[in-house]
Image (cartoon, rainbow, N blue to C red):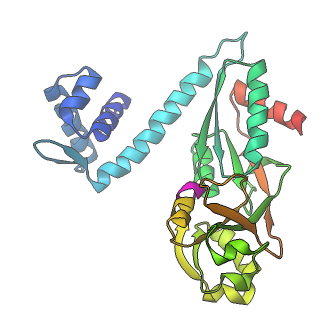
Amino acid sequence: MEFRVLKYFLMVAREENITKAAALLHLTQPTLSRQLMQLEAELGVKLFHRSKHSIILTEDGMLLKRRAQEIVSLSDKTVQELSHKEDVLSGEIAIGCGETKNMLFLSEQIKKFRQKYPLVQFSIHSAIADDIKERIEKGILDIGLLMEPVDVGKYEFIRMPQKEKWGILVRKDSELAAKESINPKDLTNVPLIMVKRELVKSELASWFGDYYEGLQIAATYNLILNAASMVERGVGVVLCFDLGATFYEDLCFIPLAPTLETGSVLVWKKNQTLGSATSQFMRYLKNAF
């Protein structure tokens, strides 16, 4: 399976049209079609559902698309790490980040670091901790900003300075919006939008105590923007961190009582040789703390 053909495959998967993809790749349509058929024969699976006007991925095609994206991303990252000039620090630092106020602190350090090393670029991937850890293991990400609880046994880590405070995001016209704080009983018989991570659910279950089993879970989420949209449309209220300004004017944040707080850590793999830019950035961060 050639790397070049994987790029062809990704272009066709994106465009869903052989003619458009061939034009973008500067290939003839028959040549591109032949390459795709050879790839299918090599893998022994059907990658596309073909029609006169479009070409759609099969389930096997969708799996290959995910893997091909990871391979191409890792290849591009490796080229960037190896092509930096010896006398000038450059390259890309890939960071996976959860939704946390500590991103403000990290952003400030990124700004200061780039003032000193302007040729260094940062690639930010927003996701939950489990996804970020998987990408670190595959070498796609260099560093992860992870929300606790998280197993850091495989990682070097720096604990971030700020704790995240839990609460609910609710419409301003809700009866709950008049409260200064929210206790477990307040959320019984209220449709809730809950986080997906099982470890975090366990933390929340401890806070709810006996009320947890009777909760009405309307939906789950991994990133807050879509959850906020559901709150705005009246699906329910979302359990989340206080991230400051809300995404919608008609929503407000109310903290939990008793207070529930969560820490976060910046992690990278133990015993891993980091690129020069990443190594320099980690030294800079340690000094910043």
The spot of residue 206 in percent (x, y) is 75, 80
Numbered label tally: 0
Instruction: Give the residue at x 77% y 47%.
Output: 102
Indicate the quadrant where residue 194 lies.
bottom right
Instruction: Give the residue at x 56% y 29%.
Output: 77
What range of the chain is rendered magenta?
A: 222-226
The spot of residue 66 in percent (x, y) is 42, 47
Name the quarter where the C terminus is drawn.
top right
| The residue positioned farthest toward the left in the image shown | 52
| The residue positioned farthest toward the top in the image shown | 87
In the rendered image of this protein, does residue 100 appear above or below residue 105? below
Instruction: Give the residue at x 59% y 17%.
Output: 83
Q: Is residue 127 left or right of residue 63?
A: right
Q: Is residue 229 left or right of residue 2?
A: right
Q: Is residue 63 left or right of residue 260?
A: left
Judge whether residue 20 can be spotted in this image: yes
The spot of residue 186 in percent (x, y) is 70, 83
